[in-house]
Image (spheres, rainbow, N blue to C red):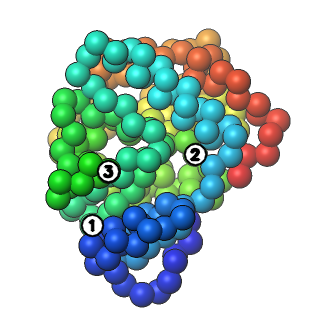
Amino acid sequence: MQVITKQTYTPAEYLELEEKAEYKSEYNNGQIFSMAGGSINHNTIALNLSSELNFAFKQQDYKVFMGDVRLWIPDKQIYTYPDVLVIAGKPQYVANRTDTITNALIIAEVLSKSTQGYDRQAKFEDYRTIPSFQEYLLIDQTRIYVEQYAKTGEKRWELRVYNAEDETISLSSVALQISLKDLYNKVNFELNAD
């Protein structure tokens, strides 16, 4: 991600700019960062995961969002766009905006070379300040490899790693399993991932 300018913006100014912008940007405590474009593998994985979740939750009170619903992290003054986001129950909107929510239950990020360090460290630290947040998936787009972090208690998270096509991810926050074969369906690892 790149800083748009060195000027500091308020959250309201960011939202006003974002409504008119051609491309999405994220907001982090006064700074606006342009978002990197996604690769074909990135998009395929996010779509596969969203589809699996959406189908599994068809008769349940969960909602799945992919890339276009903004998440507000009030404790950190951050607006961000997770690759895949799940909420339980009704969305908790920010200031009656139907494009921005606060009640993430599960967040998944498809890793890219340029953002994987941020996704693993600072972003995960930011996400953990969300009271409803229970599970984090980090999905590699260059090989079969998934890190699953599940909240087990106050300030306690358990890590599970999956790296074989015949493995199945068992989500902890909801009763659901996702096979890595389905998650990586139609992904071409020979493509250059960003």
Residue 174 is left or right of residue 116, and the answer is: left
Please tell me whether residue 48 is drawn above or below residue 191 in the rendered image: above
In the displayed image of the protein, which residue is found farthest to the front? Answer: 20
Identify the secondary structure beneath mark 3.
strand
Q: Amino acid at mark 3?
A: Asp
Label 3 sits on residue: 99
Q: Amino acid at mark 2?
A: Leu
Q: How many residues crowd around disc 2 within 10 Å: few (fewer than 14), some, or many (20 or more)?
A: many
Residue 111's label in the rendered image is 2
Residue 77's label in the rendered image is 1
- For the residue pair 25 and 192, the one nearer the viewer reads as 25
* Residue 29 seen: no
Is mark 1 in CB contact (under 8 Å) with mark 2?
Answer: no
Please tell me whether residue 19 is drawn above or below residue 54 in the rendered image: below
**Quadrant of residue 40 within the rendered picture:** top right
**Quadrant of residue 30 within the rendered picture:** bottom left
